[in-house]
Amino acid sequence: MSETAMGVVITGAAGDLGRALCASFLASGFTVFAADVNPSPAEGRLVPVKLDVTDTAAVADLAARAARETRLWAWINAAGIFIAGPVVSADIEGWQRIIAVNLTGTFNGCAAALPVLIAAGGGRIVNIGSISGQLGGIGVHPAYGASKAGVHALTKTYALEGGRHGVLCNAVAPGLLEGAMSSGFSENQRAKMANAAPLRRLGRMEEIARVVHFLTDPENSYMNGAIVPVNGGAYMPS
Ligand SMILES: NC(=O)c1ccc[n+]([C@@H]2O[C@H](COP(=O)([O-])OP(=O)(O)OC[C@H]3O[C@@H](n4cnc5c(N)ncnc54)[C@H](O)[C@@H]3O)[C@@H](O)[C@H]2O)c1
């Protein structure tokens, strides 16, 4: 009998961080359900899934499918949107869109993942938060930081409930990273943010993916409900 492959669902899988995450889980032999509104093409054990994370029923369907086709072990909520611009002109449409994708989308993922991971005998959920959820941010729609603070709180609730069932839930809170999302800022703003970190540079996607990978590892058997800052030392909560 062939052994059941280990499975991971990654939302926002076609984005900069999502691609780094897919590469890292493919390299570890996982079947990767790579979910995105604009999915990447199939490749090896990468299964592209066209998914809008705001569609609650579709997210639940994906969880059921992933649990049917693999030993679903981990679920990573990385889909997110960001709107750069002056806070004084932030509008309600931006607020609603950001909250829907970043916060409700992450809730949809956690809510779909928890019961199937419990039924499978345990697993890991990792949410992608942000330093903006800890500090707020200038030059970014206020919904962004609010949505990520919500993601951090959601993470703790799912850690409290999931931990009792062997499902550990953590978040990473990256600082500003190289890639498409940060290109919404001017060169000058990016340089200022890079200099705010003792490491004097933006983060790289692989540096976040490595921490996420550790959080999903069975070797991580006791970190639960943590909001792990991966920001080059720009903010060091105690
Ligand atoms: N890039 C940064 O500087 C940075 C910093 C902190 C946190 N983050 C967070 O990291 C995560 C990944 O960001 P990234 O830098 O890879 O951005 P990205 O824009 O490169 O990727 C985001 C991906 O999410 C997908 N997406 C958007 N709306 C979706 C929806 N409704 N349903 C499904 N997929 C959807 C997009 O198609 C895209 O592929 C996000 O949650 C982001 O908020 C990024």
Image: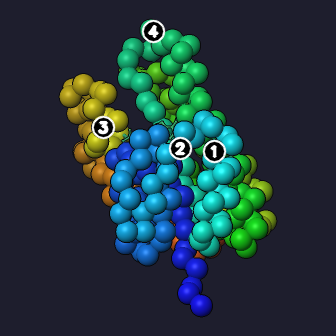
User: Which residue matches tag 3?
Assistant: 180
Quadrant of image for the N terminus: bottom right
Report, in whole angstroms, how far the alpha carbon at label 2 lies from the one at label 1.
Answer: 7 Å
Place of residue 138 in the rendered image (x, y in percent of width and height, measured from the top left): 41, 23
At label 2, counting other C-alpha atoms closer than 10 Å, the crowd grade (few under 14, some 14-19, many 20 or more) is some
Q: Is residue 119 above or below residue 169?
A: below
At label 3, counting other C-alpha atoms closer than 10 Å, the crowd grade (few under 14, some 14-19, many 20 or more) is few
Taking depth in this image into account, of 88 and 105 the one nearest to the observer is 105
State which quadrant residue 58 falls in.
top right
User: Which tag, 2 or 3, sits closer to the chain's start?
Assistant: 2
User: Which tag, 1 or 3, sits closer to the chain's start?
Assistant: 1
Q: Would residue 148 appear left or right of 190 to someone viewing this image?
A: right
State which quadrant residue 43 falls in.
bottom left
Label 3 lies in ligand 1 vicinity (Cβ under 8 Å): yes
Q: Do the residues under discs 2 and 1 have CB atoms within 8 angstroms?
A: yes
User: Which residue matches tag 4?
Assistant: 88
Could you tell me which residue is drawn at 76 percent across and 68 percent down? 119
Type of the residue with mark 2: Leu
Label 2 lies in ligand 1 vicinity (Cβ under 8 Å): yes
Q: Would residue 130 appear left or right of 204 to someone viewing this image?
A: right
User: Which residue matches tag 1?
Assistant: 58
Nearer the observer: mark 4 or 2; the answer is 2
Q: Do the residues under discs 1 and 3 have CB atoms within 8 angstroms?
A: no
Residue 33 seen anywhere in this rendered image of the structure: yes
Q: Is residue 176 above or below residue 86?
A: below
Report, in whole angstroms, how far the alpha carbon at label 3 lies from the one at label 4.
Answer: 24 Å
User: Which tag, 3 or 4, sits closer to the chain's start?
Assistant: 4
